[in-house]
Image (cartoon, grey):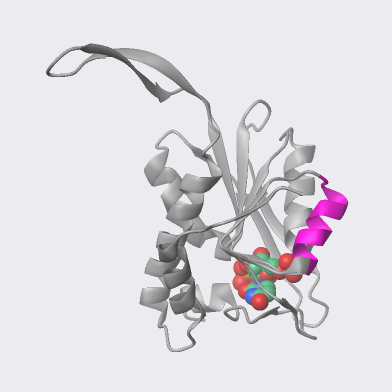
Amino acid sequence: MPVHILDHPLAAHIITHLRDQTTKPATFRTLAYQISLLLAIESTSEIETEPKVIETPLERMTSRVLKHQPLVVVPILRAGLGMVQPFTDLFPDVSVGYVGLERDHATAKARSYYCKLPPLAGRHVFVVDPMLATGGSAVSALDVIKAQGAVNPTLVSIVAAPEGVAEVEKHHPGTVIHIATLDRELNEKKYILPGLGDFGDRLYGT
Ligand code: PRP
Ligand code: URA
């Protein structure tokens, strides 16, 4: 399965501070932006470019620009919202869709509570959710967006557990996944170890 893990000293540095339980929400939000920016760059590394003739101050040359291709980013609410801004900063024409899913604290099963999506057919869709734990939320989101016309969507997460990666592969084989770190395992409450705790709570101070 195509799982891409960020390999950059800055990514390791940011992840360390995200994991640190003494990191406060304001700093956590900045770090979430920074790691998501690295992931946004990495996960879009294969989008197409086309030639463009320009004049530098010295001579004419044929260079390259991004080919017009409508991208869509779909955060899984609510923690996924912390990963959207890098995509809108880098790709001002990106469309944003929303899938609201919340894990039940007792069963760790994801419950759907909201869905608002732009047209997805023919577009490159990036599903963003910082934590890939059991994989239940990601699988549900992929189910929903594929039912709405998305083809080969890319999943972008910050921290993944092997169990979550396997679950996505089981239900959506071949999905390209970009992550910042692959952690060890889930605990009995289905939290990622060593992980960073509840991403949404740490992002929003709840
Ligand atoms: C967290 C996280 C993922 C999900 C991952 O969301 O943001 O969406 O858990 O877990 P899973 O892989 O086992 O499904 P949560 O349900 O806590 O909601 P929140 O984003 O509103 O905090
Ligand atoms: N959701 C989180 O926010 N953290 C985990 O470790 C697992 C699911």
201 vs 41, left or right, is right
Q: Position of residue 151 (x, y in %)?
A: 73, 33
Q: Position of residue 26 (x, y in %)?
A: 36, 75
Q: Identify the residue at horizontal 78%, vertical 55% (top origin).
A: 139
Residue 97 percent coordinates (x, y)? 59, 45
Q: Residue furthest bottom?
A: 22
Residue 110 locus on image (x, y percent): 77, 66
Is residue 109 in sight in this rendering? Answer: yes
Q: Residue at x 61, y 34 (%)?
A: 124
Identify which residue, 161 or 147, lies in the foreground.
Answer: 161
Q: Is residue 186 above or below residue 37?
A: below
Q: Residue placed at 54% from the left, 57% from the top?
A: 6
Q: Examine the rendering and report whether any part of residue 68 can be seen.
A: no
Residue stretch in magenta: 163-173
| 23 sits left or right of 156 in the view | left
Residue 140 quadrant? bottom right
Total number of numbered labels? 0
Instruction: Ligand 2: give its quadrant.
Output: bottom right
Q: Nearer the viewer, residue 19 or 25?
A: 19
* Residue 34 magenta-highlighted: no
Q: Is residue 118 above or below residue 187?
A: above
Report the front residue among 135 and 169. 169
Main SS, magenta residues: helix
